[in-house]
Amino acid sequence: MSVECNQTKMNLRVELDWRTTLATVLLFPTLVSLGFWQLERGDEKAGLITRLEERRLEPPMSLPAALRLPTDDLADRQVTFTGSFNAQDFVLLDNRLRDGRFGYEVVAFVSADALVVPLNLGWIEGDRSRMTTPSPELPDGEHTVRGRIYQPAGDAFLLGENKFPEGRPAIVQQLTLSSWAEPMRAAFERPVFPYEIRLLPAEPTAFRAEWAVVNQTPAKHRGYAVQWFTMALALGLAFIFRSSNLAAWLRHRLVSNGS
């Protein structure tokens, strides 16, 4: 296919190569789609940050009050309760990294009136070689604590089974409370609060309890979007110049106009 335009004895020609055309048709929309996907992810992360900041300003609520809320309105709600700790009743969430260091998150099962609450006390460092397992010193007896409800965005990736351990302390991959509901109820002989509660960083019973709101900032997602759009633009320009004599035609026209 060719398009001709008279311009001081040089014609603009378009000659399509099927390989180049096919590659462009396949890659260009993919790159553009990835760019818009990153923009959407950035907007989602910005929404999560905004929600957390708004709920930090709200007074903490009781556990029964939290249970009366719709499920989709629970994330990041602050709660307070008086819980009874058992220094040996906890699990370690495996392979949690902080600042490039290997460790665990400590989740205690705390009695709060008629409920058992999975309370994440924060991060502790572990032995990267896994030759030893840490033995964190948990509080004992009753303590008043404040935390926020954590709801994961989706199902965690698991390597094999992740059953609720009959004996504790124990190491587990993830806190899969929905699948643990029945064995936990049988083990504790009472209902279990259905969501993980993460201690606030300033709580005296916390370990290292600084929680990242998002794994990547909205600005980083926007930066990735710019990269994808830039690659799409570069591909489009490469296709145009490879499939035509546009560069030579432009140079010739500039010279002709200059003369």
Image (cartoon, helix red, strand yellow):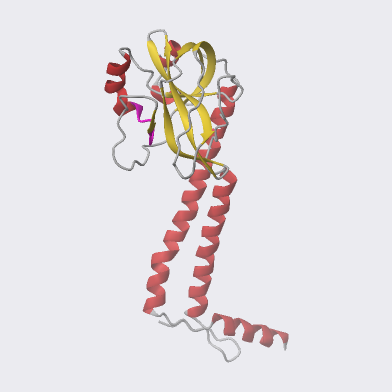
x and y percentages locating residue 101 in the rendered image:
54, 43
Query: The magenta stretch spans which residues?
Result: 172-177
Q: How many tags in the picture?
A: 0
Task: Name the residue rendered at 41%, 80% in the picture.
Answer: 16
Residue at 30 percent across and 12 percent down: it is 189
| Residue 173 painted magenta | yes
Q: For residue 20, what is the image quadrant?
A: bottom left
Q: Identify the residue at horizontal 51%, vertical 74% (top origin).
A: 238
In the depicted structure, whether residue 229 falls above or below residue 42 = below
64 above or below 153? above
Picture coordinates of residue 232, whole percent (x, y): 50, 64
**On the picture, is 173 further left or further right than 31?**
left
Q: Nearer the viewer, residue 119 or 91?
A: 91
For the C terminus, the image quarter is bottom right
Res. 183 in view = yes
Of residue 50 and residue 24, the one placed in the foreground of this image is: 50
Magenta-drawn stretch contains 126: no
Overall secondary structure of the magenta section: loop
Where's residue 151, x and y in %?
43, 29
Left or right: where does residue 134 sit relative to residue 50?
left
Is residue 152 visible in the rendered structure shown here?
A: no
**Which quadrant does the N terminus fall into?**
bottom left
Q: Is 16 located above or below residue 187 in the figure?
A: below
Instruction: Point out residue 216 in the picture as x, y percentages from the top left corner.
Output: 54, 44
Residue under the image location 29 percent in, 28 percent down: 179
In the picture shown, does residue 241 fall above or below 37? Answer: below
Looking at this view, name the residue that lies furthest to the bottom.
Answer: 9
Front in this rendered view, residue 56 or 201: 201
195 or 184, nearer to the observer: 184
Which residue, as the protein is rendered here, is positioned at the far front? Answer: 131
